[in-house]
Image: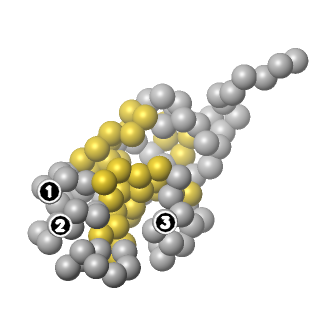
Amino acid sequence: MNVSKTLYVSSEPIQVSWIPVPQWCKDDFVGVLYTEVSDQSPCDYFDYEFLQRNQSNTFWYMTNLCRSLDFRYYSRQPKCTGNYTLIAKSPIVQPNNYNEPTHIHIA
């Protein structure tokens, strides 16, 4: 998996791309996970997108979550049954400014 940038600013798009797998499954998805989440925990994502046959990229508009993230492609190959398997993992993506104010604060 590739990402268009490894440092991002809130509301800036990040393009995530990969080579489509030959044995695609209707349950294949790309999830956004914190880097400390194990590769064996596909359901610990905080956002995801189901994929279409031959899809090779998607865009994410990130909000500064003040943590390192990565994108992971999971599939239930080869017969769309059983547990998910990690197919690909992106480089680590980090917010450009961990201290960027992104929420309303009352002083």
Which quadrant is the C terminus positioned in?
top right
Crowd tier of the residue under label 2, counting other residues whose Cα lies within 10 Å: few below 14, some 14–19, many 20 or above: some
Read off the residue under disc 3.
Answer: 43
Specify which label sits upstream in the sequence, 1 or 2.
2
Which labelled disc corresponds to residue 72?
Answer: none
Q: Is residue 55 above or below residue 11?
A: below
Q: Is residue 78 visible?
A: yes
Q: Which residue is drawn at 65% across and 43% down?
A: 66
Q: Do the residues labelled 2 and 3 touch (CB within 8 Å)?
A: no
Which of the 4 image quarters holds residue 12? top left
Which residue in the protein does label 1 denote? 53
**Position of the N terminus by quadrant:** bottom left
**Mark 2 or mark 3: which comes first in sequence?**
2
The kind of residue on which mark 3 rests is: Cys
- What residue would you read off at disc 2? 24
Q: Is residue 24 above or below residue 10?
A: below
- Answer yes or no: is residue 87 visible: no
Per the image, label 1 sits on a secondary structure element best described as: loop
Residue neighbourhood size for the residue with mark 1, other residues' Cα within 10 Å, grouped as few (<14), some (14–19), many (≥20): few
- Report the amino acid beneath label 2: Trp
Query: How many other residues sit within 10 Å of disc 3, few (<14), some (14-19) or many (≥20)?
Result: some
The vertical placement of 71 against 24, above or below, is above
Q: Does residue 59 appear left or right of residue 20 in this picture?
A: right
Residue 17 picture location, percent across and down: 26, 50
The numbered mark, 1 or 3, whose residue comes first in the sequence reads 3
Residue 60, quarter of the rendered image = top left
Q: Could you tell me how far apart the alpha carbons at marks 1 and 3 are, in whole angstroms?
A: 21 Å
Badge 1 amino acid: Arg
Disc 1 from disc 2: Cα separation: 6 Å
SS for dot 2: loop
Q: Residue at x 62, y 49 (%)?
A: 67
Q: Do the residues labelled 1 and 2 touch (CB within 8 Å)?
A: yes
